[in-house]
Image (tube, rainbow, N blue to C red):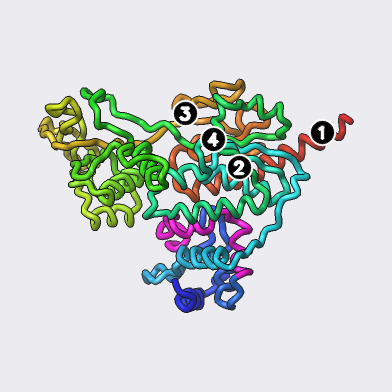
Amino acid sequence: MSMADALKEARRCLNCAKPGCRTGCPIENNIPQFIRALRDGNLGTAYEIISERSNLPAICGRVCPHEKQCESHCVLARNKNGIKVGSLERFIADFAHINGLKPIPPTTGERGSVAVIGSGPAGLTVAGDLAKMNFGVTVFEGMPEPGGVLMFGIPEFRLSKVVVRREIDQLRHIGVVFKTGVLVGPDITVDDMFAQGFDAIFMGTGTALPKTLDLPGKELAGIITATYYLQMVVLVENGKLDARETLLHDSDRILVIGAGNVAMDAARTAIRRGAKSVTVVYHKTDKQVSAFPNEFTAAQKEGVQFEFLQSPTAYTAAADGSVGGLDVEEMVQTPEGKFKPTGKHKVIPCDRIILAIGQKPAARIVSTTTGIRVDERGFVITRERPYGMTTRAGVFSSGDVVHGPATVVLAMRESKKVAAGIAQYVDAKHLLAECEE
């Protein structure tokens, strides 16, 4: 948006007494108030208002599913003319960056010291909220650069890494310390962190392990996971790896198994990197695609093909011993909405297969400490009071590692509540220590 476009859009806001847009926002951003400030030309104030609830406005303005959240709850959306909240948020955040606005003062750290494991949306939200509450915060990240899935999981065409870096720089400005290349578990443990004097620890490690399909031929070369592929592409684009490390080549015929947002990201990335063809294979219909509608539509426009109602049953080999095709069985949807196999098979030829069927938590942190319980799927168990604390006192968790894979803003919503729980716990801990003295 240009300045003129943003002001014109802001003036359309009705400033509702009961704003549905704020109800629809998972982190309850004060949308009418920042739009009003923008309308009046007070962009610094608008950015201050956004920063009260969000630590990542430039990111949320780009990747949040606004059409399902704030924008769909706008009263004007009833006539399909809702306020473009996401575009206004993005405009304000970009304006603040260009003009060097720093509305939040640096933390004093006097309220306590907290370690944050992981620098994805959950970790960055907790770190930012606690720094704003005058806690000293140190973020431990295993990758060479902070950002987690924002940096290494979302393609450049959806979220510029320049934007991610500048949002992280804003957190550095308010006093958050980042330690990269530190893998919690092998390099440092939860017990080590407590020994170093941290009052509490937050685990925001996400779902690092991709799921695979246990099918005949799974050992064939040329079968990779979407998360690995997207991570390698980011490293290649940043000049840290040779292009061959993506394991995909120009003129490859690519199959992507799965139909979520990660599958669309992988498919669109492969198209943009010169694949001869990219086909998404999904065992249900286009009505059950779990990707955001705009991502599904964008993939179709970019040339991604779709094979619906096809359930993978085996990988087939090429003459050189690598994967050469995918055996699928045709499915049919019953009148009750269930999907059943028909017994009809075919082989879809390919040169590479990308798996995008979900992720699960890694166990390297939980296995290197005691007292942190997980459920049967490996997700961390937390409690309601203090909110987000695990079964070990002082260790908190949120995000995908607790709730399963979700959107950026949903991870932020839960993590804001956990940050409040951490503050409550550390304050109580210090009060009890004072009483004992």
Indicate which disc, 4 or 3, sits on the residue closer to the N terminus: 4
Task: For marks 2 and 1, give the one nearer the viewer.
Answer: 2
User: Left or right: where does residue 210 sit relative to residue 339?
Assistant: right
> What amino acid does circle 1 point to?
Leu
Q: Give the range drawn in magenta.
A: 44-73
Q: What residue sits right under mark 3 in the picture?
A: 362
Q: What residue sits right under mark 1 in the picture?
A: 432
Asked if one can make out residue 336 in the rendered structure from this viewpoint, the answer is no
User: Left or right: where does residue 320 sit relative to residue 160?
Assistant: left
Residue 181 marker: 4
Asked if one can make out residue 367 in the rendered structure from this viewpoint, the answer is yes
Which quarter of the figure has residue 348?
top left
In this picture, is 30 found above or below 336?
below
Which quarter of the figure has residue 219?
top left
Local packing at callout 4 (Cα closer than 10 Å; few below 14, some 14-19, many 20+) is some
Q: What residue sits right under mark 2 in the picture?
A: 178
Q: Are marks 4 and 3 in contact (CB under 8 Å)?
A: no
Indicate which disc, 2 or 1, sits on the residue closer to the N terminus: 2
Indicate which disc, 1 or 3, sits on the residue closer to the N terminus: 3
Task: For marks 1 and 4, give the one nearer the viewer.
Answer: 4
Mark 1: secondary structure: helix
